[in-house]
Image (cartoon, rainbow, N blue to C red):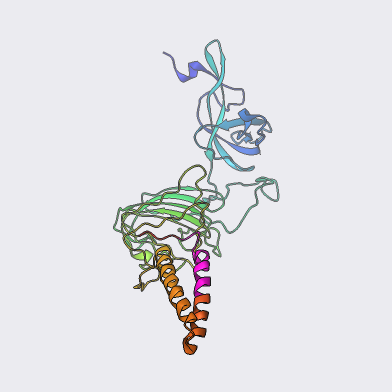
């Protein structure tokens, strides 16, 4: 019968004849991108043999997930096949599965027995302002080391900071946390204070404070929605259109609104209001100026005749009006905008 044991030759650094998991303490992590096959691997000290000073190498077990340990963290290790074969039999090597959560905290799980401080990494600084996430029943939570988290959760009335019926699903992506006095205190996401977050809801109300006044409060909506909030939002379409589509209202609220275009800006609707209480109609500029020009032309003719009649009270005003009207007719074309056009 072919078994794993018959297909795999155990490495010399395996702690026992069986394939039982064992533990090692990380002494070095490989980040050298010039050797891609080694990136993410670690050197460790075998904790099943406290007297051993040998440094062995272990590789990440999962190809789809990178959870790179820090120096002085403890990792769970197993033996599994490598890519090397010898006469149809896979050689084996050591893989690490995950770090041991010694402190029950996502920031790090490093410990030290013979040094003043833990090793961690020269590019990783220990912080006291990173808190673990408080789980709720049934949660699946992925936590980063520096206050990032992904939570798949539900609504629990009276317990979750989002409001909704029991069992309503919600997904939260958050980066950057609130600051507390105790870094070991379990916290939940804060939609108004976390640096950046994305909420995908089903029937929840969220206590979000809008950045500017809106026609309806954001916190009262209890249907499915996606809310992205941060200090600044950028939507950047590199190659094609940026499309916003809704069967209801499209609302934008800001202290200043700037819309720029290299060619055209088109607004199409049954009615376009400029101002909340708009009740005056727009005027078709070309049509009005054309009619005004024609009217002034006739008035110029009339005032010219009046100016030649020699009637003292009429001659001077009529001549002045005709001069002014001629100039106005000439200047009409310069009064038309080259950028703003109205549909008839």
Q: Is residue 48 visible?
A: yes
Q: Which residue is drawn at 49% across and 89% down?
A: 312
Residue 86: within the magenta? no
Residue 82 pos. (x, y %): 55, 22
- In which quadrant of the rendered view does residue 179 lie? bottom right
Rendered-image quadrant of the N terminus: top left
Note whether 307 is above or below 269 in the view shown. Answer: below
In the image, 287 versus 63, the foreground residue is 287
Note whether 11 is above or below 301 in the view shown. Answer: above
Residue 2 pos. (x, y %): 43, 14
**Residue found farthest to the left:** 165
Q: In this view, does 49 lie to the left or right of 255?
A: right
- In which quadrant of the rendered view does residue 91 lie? top right
Q: Residue at x 53, y 43 (%)?
A: 100
In the image, 66 versus 48, the foreground residue is 66
Rendered-image quadrant of the C terminus: bottom left
Q: Which residue is drawn at 43% across and 60% down?
A: 341
**Residue found farthest to the top:** 87
Q: Give the range drawn in magenta.
A: 324-340
- Total number of numbered discs in the rendering: 0
Residue 183 pos. (x, y %): 55, 59
Q: Is residue 152 left or right of residue 41?
A: left
**Residue found farthest to the front:** 309
Residue 112 pos. (x, y %): 65, 46
Q: In this view, does 333 lie to the left or right of 51?
A: left
Q: Is the magenta stretch mostly helix, strand or loop?
A: helix
């Amino acid at each position: 019968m072919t078994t794993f044991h018959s297909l795999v030759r155990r490495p010399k650094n395996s702690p026992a004849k069986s394939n039982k998991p064992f533990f090692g303490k990380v002494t070095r992590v490989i980040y050298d991108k010039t050797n891609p096959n080694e990136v993410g691997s670690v050197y460790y000290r075998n904790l099943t043999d406290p007297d051993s000073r040998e440094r062995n190498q272990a590789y990440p077990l999962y190809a789809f997930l990178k959870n790179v340990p820090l120096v002085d963290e403890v990792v769970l290790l197993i033996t599994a096949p490598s890519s090397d074969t010898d006469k149809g039999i896979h050689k084996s090597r050591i893989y690490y599965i995950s770090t041991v959560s010694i402190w029950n905290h996502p920031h790090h799980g490093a410990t030290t027995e013979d040094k003043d401080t833990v090793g961690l990494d020269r590019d990783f600084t220990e912080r006291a302002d990173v808190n673990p996430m408080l789980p709720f029943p049934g949660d699946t939570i992925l936590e980063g080391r520096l206050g990032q988290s992904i939570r798949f959760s539900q609504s629990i009335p009276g317990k979750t900071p989002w409001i909704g019926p029991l069992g309503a699903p919600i997904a939260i992506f958050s980066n950057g946390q609130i600051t507390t006095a105790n870094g070991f205190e379990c916290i939940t996401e804060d939609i108004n204070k976390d640096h950046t977050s994305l909420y995908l809801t089903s029937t929840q109300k969220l206590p979000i404070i809008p950045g500017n006044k809106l026609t309806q409060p954001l916190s009262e909506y209890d249907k499915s929605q996606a809310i992205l909030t941060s200090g600044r939002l950028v939507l950047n379409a590199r190659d094609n259109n940026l499309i916003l589509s809704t069967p209801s209202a499209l609302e934008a609220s800001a202290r200043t609104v700037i819309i720029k275009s290299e060619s055209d800006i088109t607004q199409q609707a049954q009615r376009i209001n400029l101002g909340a209480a708009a009740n005056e109609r727009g005027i078709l500029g070309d049509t009005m100026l054309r009619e005004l020009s024609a009217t002034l032309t006739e008035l110029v003719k009339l005032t010219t005749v009046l100016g030649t009649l020699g009637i003292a009270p009429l001659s001077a005003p009529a001549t002045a009006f005709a001069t002014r009207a001629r100039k106005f007719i000439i200047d009409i074309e310069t009064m038309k905008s080259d950028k703003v056009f109205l549909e008839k």
